[in-house]
């Protein structure tokens, strides 16, 4: 592993332990050339996934991009960081187990929305507002009204 500080190729692992509910390995590393210390994470990757955008453009799946968008939607919500990590790992495992390496971005968005809806409604609405490209307050109102069960008037 190359040192991020000086570029030295020969770094040493000082400590390894499971991270993120045992789906990754956290390694503390040391660079003998500059004395820098840094952390790396190692995950199992079953397949190299490719995202097919709505424009038809193809790009490599980026777990970090998925994680950023989910964390933005869940910002300041009462959800433990470990639960968010588990959710992200679950989504990635689900995508890898689909059997196809080419995954439409629409499918990824739907899987994320489905998962967020089970965990936190506010995060679900936040993510949906970006994913579905809400343009006005009416878009929110319509979306939220679809979430509410029909309330029958009292007689």
Image (tube, rainbow, N blue to C red):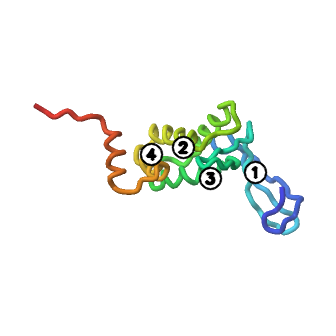
Residue 56 pos. (x, y %): 64, 47
Label 3 vs 1, first from the N-terminus? 1
> Which-is-in-front pick, marks 2 and 3?
2
How far is the residue under mark 3 from the one under mark 4? 17 Å
User: Residue drawn at (82%, 62%), measured in percent from left and top?
Assistant: 3
Can residue 52 be seen by looking at this rendering?
yes
| Residue with the mark numbered 4 | 124
Q: CA distance from mark 4 to mark 1?
A: 33 Å
Residue at the spot x=71%, y=37% of the render?
101
Residue 76 shown left or right of residue 9 in the figure? left
The span from disc 2 to disc 1 (Cα, nearest Å) is: 31 Å
Local crowd size for mark 2, using a 10 Å CA cut-off: few (<14), some (14–19), many (≥20): some
Rendering coords of residue 115 (x, y %): 50, 38
- Indicate the position of residue 67 as horizontal and vertical percent values: 59, 50
Q: Label 1: which residue?
A: 27
Badge number at residue 65? 3
The residue depicted at 80 percent of the width and 53 percent of the height is 14
* Label 2 – label 3 distance at C-alpha: 12 Å
Left-right relation of 47 to 134: right
Describe the element under mark 3 as helix, strand or loop: helix
């Amino acid at each position: 592993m190359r040192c991020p500080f000086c570029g030295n190729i020969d770094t040493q692992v000082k400590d390894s332990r499971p991270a993120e509910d045992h789906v990754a390995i956290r390694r503390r590393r040391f660079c003998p050339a500059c004395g820098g210390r840094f952390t790396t994470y190692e995950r199992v990757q079953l397949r190299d996934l490719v995202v097919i955008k709505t424009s038809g453009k193809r790009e490599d799946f980026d777990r970090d991009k998925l994680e950023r968008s989910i964390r933005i939607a869940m910002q300041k919500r009462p959800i433990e960081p470990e639960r968010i990590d588990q959710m992200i790992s679950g989504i990635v495992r689900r995508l890898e187990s689909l059997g196809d390496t080419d995954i439409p971005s629409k499918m990824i968005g739907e899987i994320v929305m489905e998962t967020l809806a089970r965990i936190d409604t506010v995060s679900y609405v936040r993510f949906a507002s970006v994913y579905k490209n809400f343009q006005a307050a009416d878009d929110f109102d319509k979306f939220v009204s679809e979430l509410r069960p029909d309330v029958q008037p009292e007689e």
